[in-house]
Image (spheres, rainbow, N blue to C red):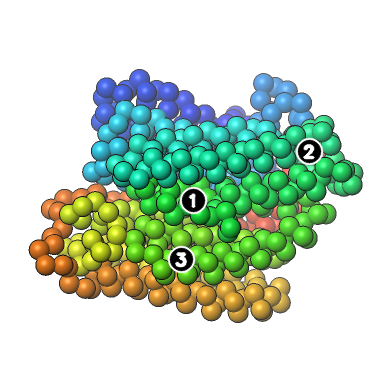
Amino acid sequence: MDVHLVLLPILLPLAGSAVALLLRKRPRLQAGWALAVMLASLAASSWLLARVWSSGGAVVFQSGGWPAPVGISLVGDLLSATMAVMSQAVLTMGIVYALGSRDRVVGYPAFYPIFLTMGAGLTGAMLTGDLFNLFVFTELLVFSGTILTAISDDRLGTEAAFKYFYMSLLASATLLLAIGSLYVSYGTLNMADLARRIAAAPDAPLLPVAIALLIATFMVKSAVFPFHFWQPDFHTASPTAVSAMLSSVVVKLGVYGFLRMTTLLFVKQAGPVQGLLVVLGLAGIVYGGLGALGTHNAKRMLAYSTLAQVGFILVAVGWGSRPALAAALVFAVNHSLIKAALLMLAGAVASRAPVKTAAFDVVTGLGRYMPLTGLLFFVGGLALMGIPPTNGFVSKMIFFRSGIEAGQFATLAVAGLVSVLTLVYVVRAFQRIWWQRPAEGAKAKAKGDQLLAPALLIAAVLLLGLWPEPLVRLSEATAIWLGDPQSYIRAVLGG
């Protein structure tokens, strides 16, 4: 039964999506079904994580009974299981938010089936042990995200969807070329087998090409500078329930890819890749902070903020030490909760604006009619700035501690100085929406999106700030696991 634990988090939302289509004429039943499916999937991924954490190994499912590397392997190790739980927890909150949203799009018969498909694609990409399957699952994710944005209530949704689709098409092309280069060179796409063969023969002519192509792929997936330009439009125009997923957990697929590259596939070649990640991460921290400071839309501001926050994670991955990898994982999980909550709160404010938008010119002063939303946004803003007692403080503390241990003082100085920008743009947003007077005659609508989902996420933000030990221990155990790639290889290939 244990081996099927790694299959259930993918199979449940995928099969649930098909059933949801059959319920298209019963919208309330369809919505309830989608939530039940995501809760069941989250329970399965949590069970998987508990299993691999307690055993210190990995749960491997060999599809069709074919042994690796002949068949397709699904692998639940500490990294993939942690990322799956993080993703599905936020996806569950996305459905909860959609249930209380006043967007027309959530009432479309295709919304919940496609949302579940997006969940299956994201989870599958993190649990697969095969590079071509990674391509298949990421395409499922791309098509789902594109459609959900294209059908948005926002009139700019179609334009944003096209930008995302064509950028993702470019990433798909680079991923396929990387897969082809690796298969020609080593005759396998199973990641464990590939890692073993690359370590034995690191001088294949196409190996540097494959590494460069994979870097480009994951840069696009995580919207790393300078491949970030599609992200603000995409996240601003998407339905709130969708943009909260895209800016919090979907971008972590690129982070996951970089972790696999540097700790499993290309261990001997990791040095130049890690150096590049530090440079790109710092550029993202600076550019994302400045972009968030210069924009005039709350959702767009938070999208630029994601560019900066992912920059911190990439810097930690680039440092590559065990404490730094643990810091990257803590930061990734905490950021997912914080950013999803803040985007939902921005969407809730926009839903009560006279014209539905998160533009500061429209929502200025409307927060006076939404005190609870303001309180939740205030706590989420503290977390984004890294102020106790929130989990954002834990993220920044562990990040800076790992940098000090690694002797990366110049990098820390730049990151620390630019972090001040987070304080500036978060405080500015709070002042504009909750402190300033609204324009003459402007008044919030009586009803808007419900606050249950962001309230639950903010509660998690405070809980992990006051009691961070379980997440920190899990991240440290994962970092130790990542430091021993042979354990992953043995778990998948045997021996």
Q: Dot 1: few (<14), some (14–19), or many (≥20) neighbours within 10 Å? A: some
Q: Residue at x 29, y 59 (%)?
A: 359
Q: Badge 2 is on which residue?
A: 182
- Mark 1 vs mark 2: give the one in front: 1
- Could you tell which of marks 2 and 3 lies nearer the N-terminus? 2
Q: Name the image quarter holding the N terminus.
A: top right
Q: Badge 1 is on which residue?
A: 230
Query: Disc 2, disc 3: CB below 8 Å?
Result: no
Asked whether 252 or 78 is in front, the reply is: 252
Left or right: 324, with 41 as reference point: right
Indicate the amino acid at tag 2: Leu
Left or right: 18, with 101 as reference point: right
Question: How far separated are the C-alphas under marks 2 and 3?
Answer: 37 Å
Q: Picture coordinates of residue 227 (x, y %)? A: 57, 53
- Could you tell which of marks 1 and 3 lies nearer the N-terminus? 1
Q: Residue 383, located in which quarter of the rendered image?
A: bottom left
- Mark 2 vs mark 3: give the one in front: 3
Q: Dot 2: few (<14), some (14–19), or many (≥20) neighbours within 10 Å? A: many
Question: How far separated are the C-alphas under marks 1 and 3?
Answer: 13 Å
Residue 371 visible in the displayed image: no
Helix, strand, or loop for circle 1?
loop
Q: Badge 3 is on which residue?
A: 291
Q: Residue at x 19, y 63 (%)?
A: 366
Q: Picture coordinates of residue 31 (x, y %)? A: 31, 33
Where is 282 relative to 145, above or below? below
Asked whether 461 or 187 is in front, the reply is: 187
Where is 29 relative to 326, above or below? above
- Could you tell which of marks 1 and 2 lies nearer the N-terminus? 2
